[in-house]
Image (spheres, helix red, strand yellow):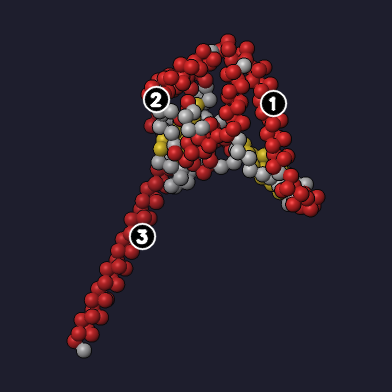
Amino acid sequence: TKIGHNHVTKMDVTLSSLGLLAILISSLAFLVRQSLARARSKSPLACISIPSPPGAHWLLGHAALVMGPLVSTVEQSDGETTNTKTVDHFAHMFVDHANEAGLTAFWMFHRRCLSVLDARHARTILQSVSDRHPIPIVTRHGRKTLGDEGLIFLRGGAEWKKQRSLIAKAFNVKALVEGRPLVLGIARNICCSLSKLCDREGSDVMKKNSNEVNANKGNSGGVEIDVSVLSKMFTIQVFGQ
């Protein structure tokens, strides 16, 4: 009986300790969440009076808005009629909430980020330093379309200088203005190629969903296409011609 009593006592102590530990962890998590929520509700650059769009998540910040769809359709009803409104999320974040200089601050997880609309500001940033600190979740998507050694993903060094020197002559104002018709023509060709590729790859999907398409014209099905090859072809043709 004495041994059994001691065993029960030890078990009670263990359960009590686990309960206190669980309460402590829950309380700590709640305090951390509240602290992050208060921080995300303010502009990351409020110290220099740069505004920030509302709706930042307490943990993700504005990452969900940045990585989400560029445009969405919202239905608004007043009880009698229903209107469809197209919302441009990027314009809402980086234009509507920008200050007079075109600056907007936003959170990408814990990182403080700045959006600029003026070409002069972008030039100042790009010329100030070649070292880049890309956000992994954004870089992962970009590398799939632009390749692993794209200039915008290189973080300085010899490789960055090599590629930058090769294309520097093509990025002056005169060359860009003169090359605009050429770029538009190549872009149209790439769009035609992409359209034909979608038609060919999506023929089975379209046949499978033909009944749904006839019933609901807004749902035409879709296919996934690897556009990395076309993106590289576009770049090669622009610089080659």
Please report contact status of discs 1 and 3: CB closer than 8 Å, yes or no: no
Circle 1: residue type: Arg
**What label sits on residue 96 in the rendered view?**
none
Between 71 and 38, the one nearer to me in the picture: 71
C-alpha span from label 2 to label 3 = 43 Å
Choose top left, top right, bottom left or bottom right for residue 192. Answer: top right
Query: Which mark is first along the chain, 3 or 1?
Result: 3
Look at mark 1 in the image and give the residue it sits on.
188
Between 238 and 61, the one nearer to me in the picture: 238
Circle 3 sits in a helix, a strand or a loop, which is it?
Answer: helix
Look at mark 3 in the image and give the residue it sits on.
26
Circle 3: residue type: Ser
**What label sits on residue 156 in the rendered view?**
2
Viewport quadrant of the N terminus: bottom left
Residue 62 left/right relative to 6? right
C-alpha span from label 2 to label 1 = 33 Å
Examine the rendered structure and indicate whether residue 111 appears above or below residue 125: below
Residue 158 left/right relative to 80? left
C-alpha span from label 1 to label 3 = 56 Å
Q: Residue at x 25, y 73 (%)?
A: 13
Q: Nearer the viewer, mark 2 or mark 3?
A: 2
Is residue 237 at all visible to an observer of this figure? yes
Examine the rendered structure and indicate whether residue 163 appears above or below residue 81: above
Which x, y percent locates residue 53? 51, 37
Q: Residue at x 59, y 15 (%)?
A: 176
Circle 2: residue type: Gly
Residue found at the very far left of the displayed protein: 2
Between 43 and 155, the one nearer to me in the picture: 155
